[in-house]
């Protein structure tokens, strides 16, 4: 592992991540990516530590990714799934978290359909003066930091596999397309990508991208390098783009009359080989999954290794989550 | 580990536990509590053994506690959850247990909503002449031995951390408050606490504590030291009490017209800082969890480290369950 | 482990298994059966490898058996249960499988209620040129190879524990009784048992055993030794049988008017001690479980160790699944 200075105890949001922190994640993940290519993909780093996956909202993909990451660091894992649990009956979420704390959990990976739950738990842990770390695995429409970090890692290792670092994205044009209003993935990506010095172009129908959206990000930053652009049409976002990130479309959005039809949505905002003609010739497409084929992206494009980074993202996910668990977990041991 | 003589093969009930057995659990748990404070909280004791958590009734807290205990002893764990299982379709519970036996399970941790299921399974295992052990993790309204043992451990280590033993409770006054009639936790605690020589005072509304209740315990014991008192009011139970155990109130009880309202219940039997004035100055409060804040106990009291042992109970739970798995599991290996 | 040559990458069906392959499974399973009788039942063979149990159809028995097998080979396991998963929402099964591939899964154990799903996933993996192996854990009414292999192992180790091999069944008479039409267990067993040179006699009511059934097997084989006989009555199948395999009766079959009543079914096709008088004196009975006592088999016969191999089958299951994971998994490592 590279010797990095890492002082962050919880990973809740990317809104105040520093360049040094982004690079620490990228470089640590690169080391683990190398471990994952070996015959024995396990390291003893977190042996004897307990990683509890507290998923108050159903998830398979993210939960499995964290579980495999924890196991490859030799940690013991506990899975809590709200659906099959009697635990939250009349018990507050903070009490559930404190129970896992009292059982000896070292790292809590938390997903909840309400924004702010991981923060509230982290604050309570700090108030109690305990060493447990909280990792936000997606909270409502707020943030999904590990997803944005794995997206960043996927892109940076494509540009420079030997030395992925955030400055590689400086001046790149990145389009984020789809249901931006409801997307925690978009929010976390906007923080990391604008921090990198990239130009970030958002494209969505006006119902999914209100004008006021950008203010949230512009208000909270003084950095002159953050460049965020909004479009209600796809074309200006795609033009000369280096990377295109499509977002999963929740079909419930249509019932809520925010969208006319899946077919029309695909016609206007679905990514296809044709539309990619507008981009840089070596453009790449990302999607956090699971994909609705033929809606957010055409089926053939999704499977085209020349353009699609979707499988690479999943693989990056394990390496990045190992890095996050390592960075916050190994600090704990040495403390 | 202390060298203890341990001959019990299953842990189903505390009704015939001996002083020697209680002390063996307390001292073994104390050793594991020490292991849990180390950097690496794992010991290889049960490596290669399989602990199957057969939870026919949903549970997260107890199941996670047993799972973490088993993993810290390096056992492999299997989780069976009736809710998501196709197994019991047309198959008897004994056949399900025998299937886990045939797969090589060494210890079965069993929860079922019917009283007596763990006993029935243990009897069947003995009849078959096999070495598998059964641990009752809560059966109907019958018993929940590991909960009572962790309560005992929590209290005894508070009195003498270096040398917890059951005689420390001799002459102490302990109040158990709440839905005693329906509580397997109360039943197991009555066995252990009266066995210790403590004075045990039960307090509940008459609907939740019928007069006949005490007979069950008095009939089955000849020991002159067992002192059990029933109260339909809180005050006499709390007066000069050293420890107060509150019980979880199932909200279903109200639908069954056994209780007027949660508000009135809290007024009459809820534990508050005010009511604790009746007790010994250094009184402590316990609750098996999950807690309905503001019903069985006031929210501020629950969080007050001066009075509340609730978090300590959860931590004790892992050490005590490691002790139980160790005592019945390591005997098996040497057999 | 015996040094065997093993070239099969996926285990999807037994229809083209060779004698050499059957014997490799039997001999490897015998070695693991020996490991399972030791104090420490674990071997480091698959350390660092990931076995993902992708069960799109609920299962406890088979899933637990594969999980314990994987853990005893020191593999890390991931459990995917469609019931509690948000993963397949709008995502194709192939995409789900590719996600687990991208996370670093080495072996996928797949159950699905549709025939052909494991094959389709295996084909896709081969098309992608990746090394992941697919193990069919039951697909629709098609096949359940690991069940048939554990049945084979159970029978062969009974005949010659020191050296189980498929030729031991040559000339034996084996009856398969019950809902053959809908049984993937029957289909896999027909391949293995006819391949062994045994006489295989199927017995079921005509609604559950149409005449055309045998053609499927006769068409696909040119081997003169395959001997398959159909009966619409139990008696000719049982007469002088060495082994009787009963199949689980799905109660849904009755709603579909394929059966008159469970009582009549038991009278005509249920296996009882009386009916076994027709068989060889040392006849043994098998059942894949879970058993409907008093339907497919009488309750007393099921528990009679003189006749019943049902518990032995479950134990064999772990050894055989360890063998399968070992054979396809260790090949991968050396590749």
Image (cartoon, coloured by chain):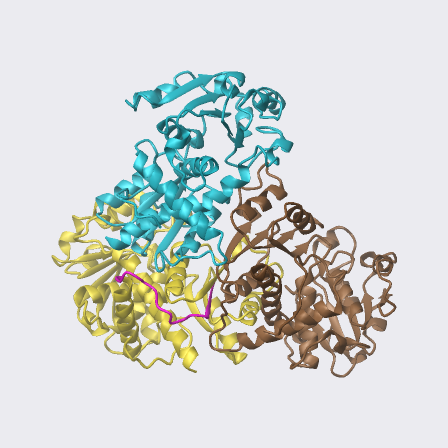
Chain colours: A cyan, B yellow, C brown
User: Front-most of A74 and C274?
Assistant: A74
Which sits in the foreground, A254 or B253? A254
Residue A74 lies, with reference to residue C309, above or below; the image says: above
Among the 4 quarters of the image, the one containing residue B28: bottom left
Task: Reply above or below: A201 against A145.
Answer: above
Q: In which quarter of the image is residue B95?
A: bottom right
Magenta segment boundaries in residue numbering: B37-53
| Residue B138 versus residue A91 in the image, above or below | below
Residue A207, how many percent across, how many down?
49, 18
Q: In this view, does C298 lie above or below A210?
A: below
Q: Quadrant of residue A281?
A: top right
C250 on left or right of B303: right
Q: Which quarter of the image is occupied by the N terminus of chain B?
A: bottom left
Q: Which of B311 and B279 is in front in this view?
A: B311
The answer, for residue A142, to whether it is visible in the render is no
**Could you tell me what secondary structure mostly forms the magenta stretch?**
loop
The reply to whether the magenta stretch includes residue C176 is: no
């Amino acid at each position: 592992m590279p010797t990095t200075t890492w002082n962050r105890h919880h990973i809740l949001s990317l809104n105040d991540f520093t360049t040094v922190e982004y690079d620490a994640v990228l470089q640590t993940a690169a080391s683990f990516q190398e471990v994952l290519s070996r015959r024995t993909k396990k390291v003893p780093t977190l042996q004897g530590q307990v990683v509890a996956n507290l998923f108050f909202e159903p998830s398979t993909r993210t939960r499995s990714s964290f579980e495999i990451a924890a196991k490859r660091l030799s940690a013991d894992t506990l899975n809590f799934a709200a659906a099959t649990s009697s635990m939250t009956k009349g018990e507050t979420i903070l009490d559930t978290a404190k129970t896992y704390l009292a059982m000896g959990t070292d790292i809590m990976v938390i997903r909840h359909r309400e924004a702010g739950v991981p923060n509230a738990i982290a604050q309570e842990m700090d108030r109690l003066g305990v060493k447990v770390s909280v990792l936000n695995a997606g909270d409502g429409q707020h943030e999904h930091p590990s997803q944005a970090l794995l997206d960043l890692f996927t892109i940076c290792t494509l540009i420079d596999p030997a030395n992925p670092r955030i400055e590689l994205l400086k001046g790149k044009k990145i389009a984020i397309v789809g249901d931006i209003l409801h997307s925690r993935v978009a929010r976390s990506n906007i923080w990391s990508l604008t921090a990198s010095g990239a130009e970030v172009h958002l494209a969505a129908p006006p119902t999914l991208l209100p004008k006021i959206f950008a203010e949230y990000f512009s208000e909270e930053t003084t950095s002159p390098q953050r460049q965020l652009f909004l479009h209600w049409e796809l074309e200006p976002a795609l033009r000369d783009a280096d990377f295109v990130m499509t977002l999963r479309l929740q079909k419930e959005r249509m019932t809520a009359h925010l969208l006319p039809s899946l077919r029309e949505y695909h016609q206007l905002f679905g990514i296809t080989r044709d539309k990619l003609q507008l981009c840089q010739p070596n453009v790449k497409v990302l999607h956090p999954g699971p994909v609705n084929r033929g809606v957010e992206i055409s089926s053939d494009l999704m499977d085209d290794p020349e353009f699609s980074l979707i499988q690479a993202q999943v693989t990056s996910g394990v390496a990045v989550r190992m890095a996050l668990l390592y960075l916050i977990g190994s600090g704990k041991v040495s403390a």
